[in-house]
Amino acid sequence: MESADKGYVTFMDGVRSCLPTVLGYLGTGFAFGIVGINAHLNIFEVTLMSLIIYGGSSQFVLCGLLLTNASIPGMIFTVFLVNLRHLLMSMTASPYFRNESLLQNISLGSILTDESFAVFSTTAAQEKHFTAQWMQGLNWTGYVTWFVSTLLGALVGNLIPDPNKFGFDFAITAMFVGLFIFQFQWELSKSTRKAIVVVITVAISLYLLMIVVSSALAVIIAALLGCVAGGLVHD
């Protein structure tokens, strides 16, 4: 897994690797702060949610459920399904850190996000050398940025009575689109056939599954089917 350069070794290397995704954290976190305030949460509750749940998509979904007076068990189960993809991401990352301590692995997995996983998976696919300290820098930079942006959004949330009017509810979707394009371009450069097969598999299965199951469960199953398709295709 060594490359020609020294790779990604220190905590500061991780901070620098996170910088391209910081704008995504800032924009989405700011939007969530505004949406959270307009879901009748106070600043403390909004920021505490970001510190504890730390999941952009699930936090937006939770705000919507709060506005519809959904039951507590229903909210817990929905957030669990939306965040279930983090289990898959952690399982994918864990073999690279099997020599680290249990506490180190718990720390790495607890604040792993879609953005940091995208950077990690691309780095791993390029067979560049990296360490747990690099991963910590990558994760913690995102975590702190998310908290700060959420706080800023909550502070100005009362000034924007209808965040949907300005498209803030679309922020999380826009971020995922950006991550997808970034990752897909790299996979396409490696294996055109495999990348196309995976995208088609996910798209078709997602469309069909959303007819019979919830959207959150459909995304999880479609992602798993895409992984299977990618594993079966060989160039």
Image (tube, grey):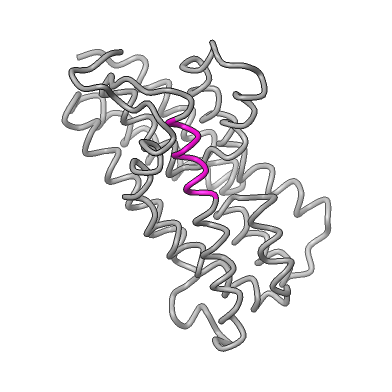
| Closer to us: 80 or 29 | 29
Q: In the image, residue 146 lies at what x, y percent?
A: 53, 57
Q: Give the quarter of the image for residue 151.
A: bottom right
Q: In the image, residue 17 lies at what x, y percent?
A: 34, 41
Mark count: 0
Viewport quadrant of the N terminus: top left
| Closer to us: 16 or 42 | 16
Identify the residue at horizontal 54%, vertical 63% (top origin).
Answer: 148
Q: What stretch is highlighted in magenta?
A: 134-143
Main secondary structure found in the magenta portion: helix
Q: Give the quarter of the image for residue 72.
A: bottom right
Q: Give the quarter of the image for residue 170.
A: bottom left
Q: In the image, residue 177 lies at what x, y percent?
A: 35, 52
Placement of 200 over or under 96, stated as above or below: below
Identify the residue at horizontal 38%, vertical 37% (top origin).
Answer: 118
Identify the residue at horizontal 57%, vertical 75% (top origin).
Answer: 34
Q: Does the magenta stretch include residue 141?
A: yes
| Closer to us: 1 or 89 | 1
Viewport quadrant of the C terminus: top left
Q: In the image, residue 150 lies at what x, y percent?
A: 56, 65
Placement of 126 over or under 29, stated as above or below: above
Give left or right: position of 124 versus 132.
left
Placement of 129 over or under 200, stated as above or below: above
Identify the residue at horizontal 76%, vertical 49% (top origin).
Answer: 76
